[in-house]
Amino acid sequence: MFSFQYNGGEYYKNIKEMKEWLRGKRIFDEYGEENTYKEFWDMVDEKQKTGKRNHAKKFPGNTEKVIGGYSFSDCDFC
């Protein structure tokens, strides 16, 4: 499953807020390829449906959270 960076809740506190925050911004993947807003969320939705591993559920702790079924991490690739 996709794991989001939480940033201490500074920019968004859930997926709805994150979608609003990302609207109009440029989105790049880890390889430097730019994705449209729709492409990004289509990919996230697909991973949510087919993903069997939720990082935050598998490695619970102070830096990992599950919010609305989505995995969030509050550290750099921990």
Image: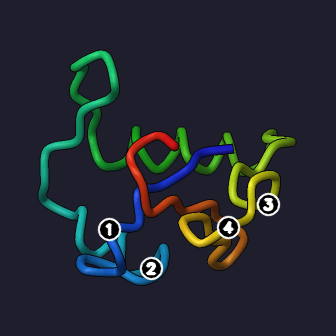
Q: Is residue 30 left or right of residue 26?
A: right
Which residue is at 76% across, 51% downward? 54
Q: Nearer the viewer, mark 2 or mark 3?
A: 3
Q: Which residue is mark 2?
A: 16
- Amino acid identity at mark 3: Lys
In the rendered image of this protein, does residue 47 appear above or below residue 57? Answer: above
Cα distance between the residues tagged 3 and 4: 9 Å
Q: Answer whether labels 2 and 4 touch (C-beta < 8 Å).
A: no
Q: Which residue is mark 4?
A: 61
Label 2 CA crowd tier, 10 Å (few <14, some 14–19, many 20+): few
Q: Answer whether labels 1 and 3 touch (C-beta < 8 Å).
A: no
Q: Which residue is mark 3?
A: 57
Q: Secondary structure at mark 1?
A: helix
Q: Choose top left, top right, bottom left or bottom right for residue 59.
A: bottom right
Cα distance between the residues tagged 1 and 3: 18 Å
Q: Secondary structure at mark 4?
A: loop
Residue 7 is marked as 1
Which residue is at 44% across, 79% downward? 16
